[in-house]
Image: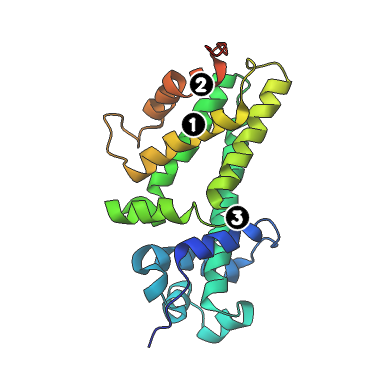
Amino acid sequence: MTRPGAPLGKLMARAVRGLGSHPEPDDIEARLLDASIAVLAEQGTQSATIDEVARRAKVGRATVFRRFSSKDQLFERALGREMYRFLSEVQQRAENFDDVADRVAETFAVCIEITGHPLLRNASARGRASFIDAIGQGSPSPKDLARGYFVSKIDELRAEGRIPPGDSERQADVLIHIVLGYLVSPESPVDLANPIEVRALARETFSPILLAPNEPKVG
């Protein structure tokens, strides 16, 4: 009988707390983490098994338990690595551009690529909604982590005088919610699989949020 695992939201919340505290995985561990994400995407936390992860990673069950004490710990580590990869990808690709609008466009492009992640690629509308709910759980939650990252980057640009005065917290929150909207409902007249179209959309919609002059409040 398969022991039900912890809900995805709890696993993600625990993964946030351990983010960045683990060394780079060796070949066997990397295969286990990759297999874990694939199994989670197909079977969910309740039905996924260590046996299936081991089979896909081409290792024995005992090898898994020599490295991880439980199914939940394995899945937490796998989810944490995905979060770390995402933030690293955003930073590396955005820093290839000096122009602020280009940085914003590239950041948005990386975020939209999440729609192709195994956990979302073939998910139903209900599955996507459950994923969005999961990344909002915990303190801090994965969503809090992303918001904090974007606030820090907006603050850096503002300190350098590259964007007008404004409220970084509110701006980051708007950007996060726009991205979440596309993740939960990716049907769009914009071809989200086309990086050129995605970057153009970001320049038209995201960049003005940061670059438009901050108008004084009325009243």
> Residue 160, image x and y in percent?
73, 20
The reply to whether callout 1 and callout 2 are in contact (CB within 8 Å) is yes
- Helix, strand or loop for disc 1: helix
Q: Which residue is mark 3?
A: 139
Q: Amino acid at mark 1?
A: Val
Q: Amino acid at mark 3?
A: Ser
- Helix, strand or loop for disc 3: loop
Within the image, what quadrant is residue 44 found in?
A: bottom left
The reply to whether callout 3 and callout 2 are in contact (CB within 8 Å) is no
Q: Residue at x 68, y 28 (%)?
A: 155
Within the image, what quadrant is residue 159 found in?
A: top right
The reply to whether callout 3 and callout 1 are in contact (CB within 8 Å) is no
Distance between the alpha carbons at the discs numbered 3 and 2:
27 Å
Q: Which residue is mark 1?
A: 174
Q: Amino acid at mark 2?
A: Ile
Distance between the alpha carbons at the discs numbered 3 and 1:
20 Å
